[in-house]
Amino acid sequence: MSKNINTKLTRLIKYYSLINHNLIFSNKSINRYNRNQTSIKKNKTKKLENLREKIDKIKNCKLKEFATNLVFSDGNPNAKIMIIGEGPGANEDKEGFPFVGRAGQLLDKMLHAINLSRKNVYITNVVNYRPPENRKPTEKEVDRYLPYLKKHIEIIGPKIILLLGSTAMNAILHNADVISKMRGKWYEIEINNLKVNSIVSFHPAYLLRQPDQKKFSWIDLKMIRDKLKKF
Ligand code: URA
């Protein structure tokens, strides 16, 4: 009899040593989505590389014919805020990064004023090649690059989009309004099924020409600073 109990006990001990007690007795839910941050980041990098390659393969584009470099982006792909400008200028075309000229220096100062830098924002443009003589991109050119810009937004998945200047505003908000009417307000927009808070503000190149407008730009920047606290 006691031998029988001993055998049963030994079997029971063996059984319990094979199973995970935590899973049986814990009332905590099991996290089946244990994807770690590193793999998410790698995935994002791959998607961005793919997008860059697709833009690089664009054919029959006048902008591309005259440009030196593809200007894709700068900053942190995991940033909560994505900044969209119009298109590269001469300095950007030479260096291959957005907002590196005088307008870019002012943008950096504006970001600094609300404790941001290129380490915690992501920057791109509506068109990825410099329009000749720094002209505005045509409607046709904007339409051609818009699907790539939307994909770019989808990959980054920002909480906030700052649209600098009328080209970015018109492209993303699909309107023909002026910045002075649209700035200083939040717009909840949907891009490729992604809901994002967007705000419009003056382009830094415009602020260099019209410094008296910087006071309005400061109001917009403070709105961004406050909104970021929520995320
Ligand atoms: N102006 C823009 O809109 N984008 C740049 O990258 C530089 C200047």
Image: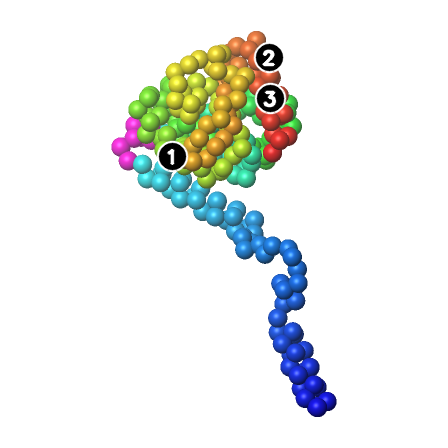
- For residue 108, which quarter of the picture? top right
Q: Is label 2 in a helix, a strand or a loop?
A: helix
| 159 lies above or below 15 | above
Q: Mark 1 or 3 closer to N-term? A: 1
Q: Amino acid at mark 1?
A: Tyr
- Mark number, residue 148: 1
Relative side of 134 to 79, left or right = left
Q: Is residue 85 visible?
A: yes
- Ranked by sequence position, the earlier of labels 2 and 1 is 1
**Front of the two marks 1 and 3:** 3
Q: Which amino acid lies under the numbered mark 2 shown in the image of this protein?
A: Lys
Q: Position of residue 107 (x, y in %)?
A: 55, 23
* Residue 91 on the magenta span: no
Please report the bounds of the magenta region as a residue range: 59-65
Question: Closer to us: mark 3 or mark 2?
Answer: 3
Residue occupying the point 40% across, 20% down: 170
Q: Which residue is nearer to you in this view: 12 or 46?
A: 12
- Left/right placement of residue 41 relative to residue 22 reads left
User: Residue 62 colored magenta?
Assistant: yes
Tell me where residue 11 appears, x and y as whole percent. 64, 81
The residue where tag 2 is placed is 215
Q: Which residue is mark 3?
A: 223
Which label was assigned to residue 90?
Answer: none
Residue sitting farthest toward the right:
2
